[in-house]
Image (cartoon, rainbow, N blue to C red):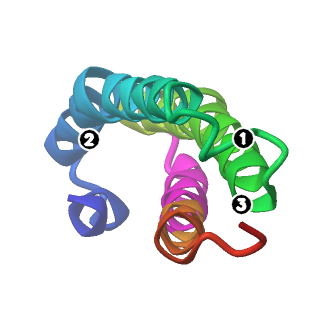
Amino acid sequence: MVRLTAAGDKAAADGLEVSILRFSLPGIGLAGFLGFGLAGMSDKVFKMSQTWLSIAAVLWIVLLAVLFFVARPAIKAFRDGDAAARGRIMMATGISHLILVVTLYLMIFKPGA
C-alpha cells in the first residue's frame, strides 16, 4: 500500500489512512499498555529500571508520536493533493519500521536484564 501511495494513488492513501487510524494506532497503543501491565504484574521479574524495558517504553512513545503527528497528517495532506507529502509518508513509514525492529530486538534479547 505504501508503494501505491508513493506512486500517487489517492485511493491507496485513503486506505493507508484508515489502516493507521483504525488499526495501527489503537493496536500499538493497546500492545504497549498490555505489555507494561504484564511487566508490572510480573512478581518483580521485570522492573522499569531495567535498561531494555525503559528503552522500549521510550521507543513506544516515539512510535505513537511518529504515527500520530507525522504519518497521519502527511497522509491527509497527500489525500488532499499535496504531492510533497509522499516523502513524509515514506519517512514516517521507515522510522516506524526501524522502531519496531529495535523494539522487537529489545523484547527478544533483553539487553541489560
Q: Residue furthest front?
A: 43
Assign the N terminus to one quadrant of the image.
bottom left
Between tags 1 and 2, which lies in front?
1
- Residue 67 is labelled as none
Amino acid of disc 1: Lys
Where 112 falls versus 12 (above or below)?
A: below
Q: Label 1 crowding class (10 Å Cα cut-off): few <14, some 14-19, many 20+?
A: some
Q: Percent position (x, y) of residue 53? A: 68, 50
Magenta-drawn stretch, dominant element (helix, strand or loop): helix
Residue at screen point 71% across, 60% down: 52
Where 88 falls versus 103 (above or below)?
A: above
Task: Identify residue for label 3.
Answer: 52
Q: CA distance from mark 1 to mark 2?
A: 36 Å
Residue at screen point 75% across, 43% down: 58
Q: Percent position (x, y) of residue 68? A: 56, 27
Q: Does the magenta-highlighted stretch encompass residue 91? A: yes
Between tags 2 and 3, which lies in front?
3
Assign the C terminus to one quadrant of the image.
bottom right
Q: Does 98 sit left or right of 7 as displayed?
A: right
Between tags 1 and 3, which lies in front?
1
Instruction: Return the disc, 1 or 2, that comes first in the chain's sequence.
Output: 2
Would you say residue 77 is visible in this rendering?
yes
Task: Identify residue for label 1.
Answer: 47
Q: Which residues are magenta?
A: 80-97
Task: Identify residue for label 2.
Answer: 16
Residue at screen point 56% across, 47% down: 85
